[in-house]
Amino acid sequence: MSIIVCGINHKIASVALREKIFFALEKLPLYLQDLLSSGLTKEAVLLSTCNRSELYCETEELDGIKDWFCRQGINGKSENENETLRHELRSVLYVYQGQKAVEHIMGVACGLDSMVLGEPEILGQVKVAFSESCTAGAVGSVFHRLFQQVFAIAKEIRSTTAIGACPMSIASTTMILVKRLLNSRSNQNIADAKVLLLGAGDTIQLILRYLQNSPAKKTWIANRCIEKAAQLTDIYGGEAVNLNQLATLVPQTDLMITATASLEPLVTAALLKKTLAARNKKPLIIFDLAVPRDIEPEAAFLPGIQLYCIDDLKTIIQENHTNRQHAAEKAQEVIRIKSEAWMLQQRSQDQVSDTIRAYREQIEAICEAELVKALGQLAKQQDAETVLRHFAYGVTNKLLHAPSVQLRQAGSEGRLDILRLAKQLLTIPEFDQKAI
């Protein structure tokens, strides 16, 4: 079996493609059950974030795994459209095996493969994905060992390199660009803006932390569960509202930031078009940080609408990459060394497991042969005690024959290391010659 990484990310797939193959957290058990029932793998972890969708598994069925992954992008439309999507996914799909796969998983957890280099949120997302896969019964001994090592290395790299210094995130990068955009608009700033936030997850909470330091003129938090939005307003201020109030709130809004887990757009181009008259040509800046997207892409063509998706943050993010490149290189070297050590340990574990399995099969074969002989004797009404003694004697002799031959040969060759190893392996007590 080989450890495999199969997926797409922000480096090779646009947000328009990434949103078509997204493993929603609440549906992870269903995806994993389907994968396990296919017989392609016995261990798997699925990870989906705004920047990537990846499958980590242990398998020899590489083509089957790639086919399964690409099928998850089927969107229920015509077979021709589904086939086109599968072809598009296959054209950008990356696959890593063995040590390269382990290095990649470690790099992802450390933030080295993130759009924002070193961003800290990804480690939490990997931990959640691992936990959900454990709950779904998709994690065995190999992945349990692997991910414990992954989490330990992520912690080590953050404490021993500068990759985690002054951490940035998608949220903080968004707010940097927001500030630039508002300043370019007649020197406006956050204090002059009315802000509408859609969602109540980690990204929106980070946005709210920023707004605590630079308060907006007015802040609304809209969420499908208004109680969760109200919990955030209790901490950060603002007003909790229902999503069905968007038509009323959008005309008043200067800045909208969305980051929900919805699988369908929450704000349509039609809804925004209806609000244009009420806005009286007042521009609206929208940052859609969700994958799948919360805002219909067609909204970007409406007058006065400045719509940005997560891929539009790359200019500022590149500045962060340049500043952290040395730390990233140091972290990558740590990962290379650690992944190599883990793979060596894994190969040793595999060899041990294979040896134990082969030895068990050998012992079982000996016992089965003696058992068949004993059962035949009992069927002939032979004395049970005599049969059992012969059975025990036969098993003992056959078990001792090969080791005895090897030990005698080692002794005749003066290979005392073999004798010491045999005592240790078989837990043989030291022979007390004084007792003779």
Image (spheres, rainbow, N blue to C red):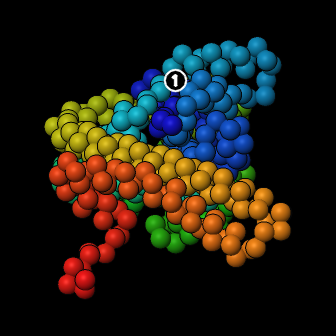
Task: Say left or right for 115 vs 353.
Answer: left
Residue 272 vs 383, above or below: the answer is: above
Q: Residue at x 21, y 39 (%)?
A: 333
Residue 392 vs 105, above or below: the answer is: below
Q: Residue at x 78, y 58 (%)?
A: 376
The residue furthest bottom is 435
The answer to whether one can see residue 100 in this image is yes
Question: Looking at the picture, how far across and down is residue 63, in whole percent?
Answer: 59, 23
Q: Pointer 1: what residue?
A: 93
Residue 197 vs 264, above or below: the answer is: below
Quadrant for residue 373, please give it. Answer: bottom right
Q: Is the residue marked by circle 1 packed among few (<14), some (14-19), or many (20+) residues within 10 Å?
A: some
Quadrant for residue 385, please give it. Answer: bottom right
Q: Residue at x 43, y 29 (%)?
A: 96
The answer to whether one can see residue 229 in this image is no
Task: Say left or right for 89 vs 401.
Answer: right
Q: Secondary structure at mark 1?
A: loop
Question: Looking at the picture, how far across and down is residue 27, in whole percent?
Answer: 68, 48
Q: Nearer the viewer, residue 254 or 158?
A: 158
Q: Nearer the viewer, residue 4 or 202?
A: 4
Q: Nearer the viewer, residue 90 or 298?
A: 90
Task: Say left or right for 134 vs 10.
Answer: right
Amino acid carrying label 1: it is Leu
Q: Residue at x 22, y 51 (%)?
A: 412
Question: Looking at the picture, how far across and down is residue 332, in whole percent?
Answer: 24, 39
Instruction: Assign the C terminus to one quadrant of the image.
Output: bottom left
Task: Say left or right for 315 vs 327.
Answer: right
Tell me how many marks there are: 1
